[in-house]
């Protein structure tokens, strides 16, 4: 198998739902990261890119079904450069990295791009077709922003509960209190704010120029959901989002404050083999050494990274004591704390040192690519080490990637 090098990784700043990036189409967000990524490697002829892999969890709207190909064309790559879009829901961006890395490792490609994109703001409504023509009754319009839609009636109803209720089940299982979740969320905001102030996101960010109806365009250059002044007092005032406080037999702990926000954004990475590395004229950030995937009951989807990471580390010949950083996507504070509780050998001091999705945002298709990129940049700054990027995935899956330098 060929070694797989991650040469560079860029992302847009992540925007709030209906925020700074609301007017920007997802295919344009993806194209922006592709252009910026290649602009940072001027020695590389774009015609040498052999494929573009992008993750996207929606695909029902302006992504136009295959946003990878759309992004390549919009970014100005030669029409000879193909593109494929993959979907593993919240881990779609990391799945794109995994599939691209496999192509390089297997010798099917020497130079590939991988990434992910999501505009949750611009996710469309969908109207199912009727079984019979000219129906007399009403029909239902579905939002494609997040969660289950048009569920098969044969699906076990225990599995089709809201994502936040799944987080509540994890909190129940591990006895994770509202206070613990709020404290974790607060730390995420404070770590992200500190990392931003120290310039630790600068190497991965590709600011987006957003036209406005009046005045000069907005240069959007910082993640929009980070709250440096967040406090436990303010978080404590938020009402539970999925259960009623005092509900019989169960706690009500998950709020908007200790969960990731709906977001917009994109990320892109450049992966190569030895020959491809020579063509870039650059030193790689890191090397991809192993992957792991796992599945479990959908109603406890947030715990799937536990075994995915275990498998990935075993393949890489590593253990938790070897880790310099573990980036676990923060869909919910309860989900993160539940995973940590099931890793007895893991040191939480290396967990999300620059904050996570609770502060930075979680544009579904982009988050996995962001995690891989931010691990690589952290290892490059350190000069050596081992890191893991991992996510839980709705409907009961987890995906993990090991990087080394």
Image (cartoon, rainbow, N blue to C red):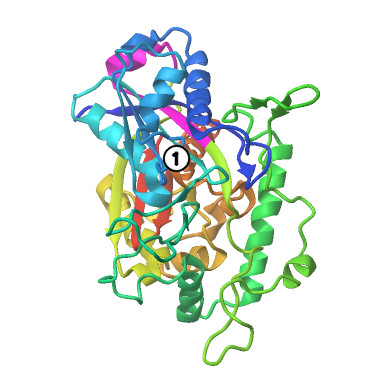
- Can residue 322 be seen here? The reply is no
- Residue at 44% x, 15% y: name it: 282
The structure residue drawn at horizontal position 33% and vertical position 16%, both measured from the top left corner, is 49
Q: Does the magenta stretch include residue 367?
A: no
Q: Mark 1 points at which residue?
A: 61
* SS label for mark 1: loop
x and y, in percent, of residue 175 in the image: 52, 81
Q: Where is residue 150 in the image (x, y as percent from the top left)?
A: 36, 61
Residue under the image location 63 percent in, 89 percent down: 246
* Residue range of the region highlighted in magenta in the rendering: 266-282
The percent coordinates of residue 48 (x first, y second) are: 32, 11
Q: Is residue 227 above or below residue 25?
A: below
Front in this rendered view, residue 221 or 181 = 221
| Residue 43, picture quadrant | top left
Residue 2, image x, y percentages: 22, 27
Q: Which residue is drawn at 81% across and 23% down?
A: 215
Q: In which quarter of the image is the C terminus?
A: top left
Is residue 256 shown left or right of residue 400? right
Can residue 215 be seen? yes
């Amino acid at each position: 198998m060929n070694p797989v090098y991650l040469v560079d990784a860029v992302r847009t700043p992540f925007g709030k739902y209906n925020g700074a990036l609301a007017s920007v189409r997802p295919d344009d967000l993806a194209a922006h990261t592709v252009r910026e990524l290649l602009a940072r490697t001027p020695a590389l002829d774009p015609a040498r890119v052999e494929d573009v892999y992008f993750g996207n969890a929606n695909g029902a709207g302006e992504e136009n079904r295959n946003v990878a190909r759309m992004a390549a064309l919009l970014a100005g790559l030669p029409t000879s450069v193909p593109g494929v879009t993959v979907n593993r829901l919240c881990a779609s961006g990391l799945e794109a990295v995994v599939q691209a890395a496999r192509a390089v490792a297997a010798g099917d490609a020497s130079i590939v791009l991988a990434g992910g994109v999501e505009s949750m703001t611009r996710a469309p409504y969908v109207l199912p077709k009727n079984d019979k023509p000219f129906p007399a009754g009403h029909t239902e319009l579905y939002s494609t922003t997040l969660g289950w839609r048009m569920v098969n009636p044969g699906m076990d109803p225990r599995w089709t509960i809201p994502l936040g209720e799944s987080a509540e089940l994890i909190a129940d299982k591990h006895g994770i209190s509202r206070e613990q979740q709020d404290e974790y969320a607060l730390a995420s905001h404070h770590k992200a704010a500190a990392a931003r102030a120290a310039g630790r996101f600068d190497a991965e960010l590709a600011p987006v120029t957003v036209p406005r109806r009046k005045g000069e365009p907005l240069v959007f250059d910082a993640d929009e959901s980070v709250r440096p002044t967040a406090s436990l007092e303010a978080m404590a005032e938020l009402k539970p989002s999925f259960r009623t406080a005092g509900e019989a037999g169960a706690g009500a702990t998950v709020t908007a404050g200790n969960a990731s926000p709906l977001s917009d954004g994109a990320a892109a990475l450049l992966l190569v083999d030895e020959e491809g590395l020579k063509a870039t004229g650059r030193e790689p950030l890191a090397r991809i050494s192993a992957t792991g995937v796992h599945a479990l009951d959908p109603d406890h989807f947030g715990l799937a990274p536990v075994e995915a990471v275990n498998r990935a580390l075993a393949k890489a010949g590593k253990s938790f004591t070897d880790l310099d950083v573990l980036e676990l996507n923060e869909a919910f504070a309860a989900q993160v704390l539940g995973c940590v509780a099931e890793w007895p050998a893991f040191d939480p001091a290396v967990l999300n040192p620059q904050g996570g999705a609770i502060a930075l945002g979680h544009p579904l298709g982009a988050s996995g690519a962001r995690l891989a990129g931010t691990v690589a940049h952290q290892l490059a700054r350190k000069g050596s080490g081992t890191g893991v990027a991992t996510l839980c995935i709705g409907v009961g899956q987890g995906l993990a990637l090991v990087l080394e330098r």
